[in-house]
Image (cartoon, grey):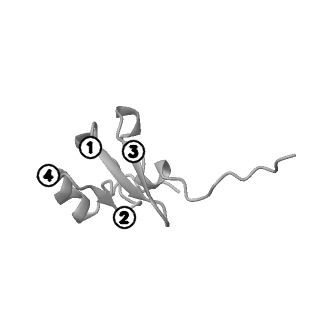
Amino acid sequence: MARSNWKTPFIDKSLLTNISKKKKKKNIWSRRSTIYPVCVGLKLSIHNGKDMVNRKIKPEMVGHKLGEFAPTRKNRTEKK
């Protein structure tokens, strides 16, 4: 479900401070945060529930949630 138009896009405060300070260590646990244009070009480690998944933020990702780019389930296909 999309966020209402009258609400602003959500970004976690800790993520916002990491981006503004340009910290080297960028481990992100807030999968619900929206990707802002300021984040383009950053390399973030997004938590998927078990591990940290490294992703470089591209311009096409702006407006999406961070959790969309860190899959939580593995694709298990049956081998014959």
38 vs 3: above or below: above
Q: Residue 4 occupies which quadrant of the picture?
A: bottom left
The residue under the point 30% across, 55% down is 8
Q: Label 2 crowding class (10 Å Cα cut-off): few <14, some 14-19, many 20+?
A: some
Depth check, mark 4 against mark 3: the one in front is: 3
Q: CA distance from mark 4 to mark 2?
A: 17 Å
Return the x and y of residue 35 as percentages of the image width and height: 34, 47
Q: Which residue is mark 4?
A: 20
Residue type, mark 2 in image: Trp
Q: Is residue 60 left or right of residue 16?
A: right
Q: Earlier in the sequence, mark 4 or mark 2?
A: 4
The residue under the point 22% across, 42% down is 38
Q: CA distance from mark 3 to mark 2?
A: 13 Å
Q: Are marks 1 and 3 in contact (CB under 8 Å)?
A: no
Q: CA distance from mark 2 to mark 1?
A: 16 Å
Q: Are marks 2 and 1 in contact (CB under 8 Å)?
A: no
Q: Residue 58 occupies which quadrant of the picture?
A: top left
Q: CA distance from mark 4 to mark 1?
A: 10 Å
Q: Earlier in the sequence, mark 1 or mark 3?
A: 1
Q: Label 3 crowding class (10 Å Cα cut-off): few <14, some 14-19, many 20+?
A: some
Q: Secondary structure at mark 1?
A: helix
Q: Earlier in the sequence, mark 4 or mark 3?
A: 4
Q: Label 1 crowding class (10 Å Cα cut-off): few <14, some 14-19, many 20+?
A: some
Return the x and y of residue 40 as percentages of the image width and height: 28, 38
Q: Which residue is mark 1?
A: 39
Q: Which mark is residue 29?
A: 2
Q: Secondary structure at mark 4?
A: helix
Q: Which residue is mark 3?
A: 55
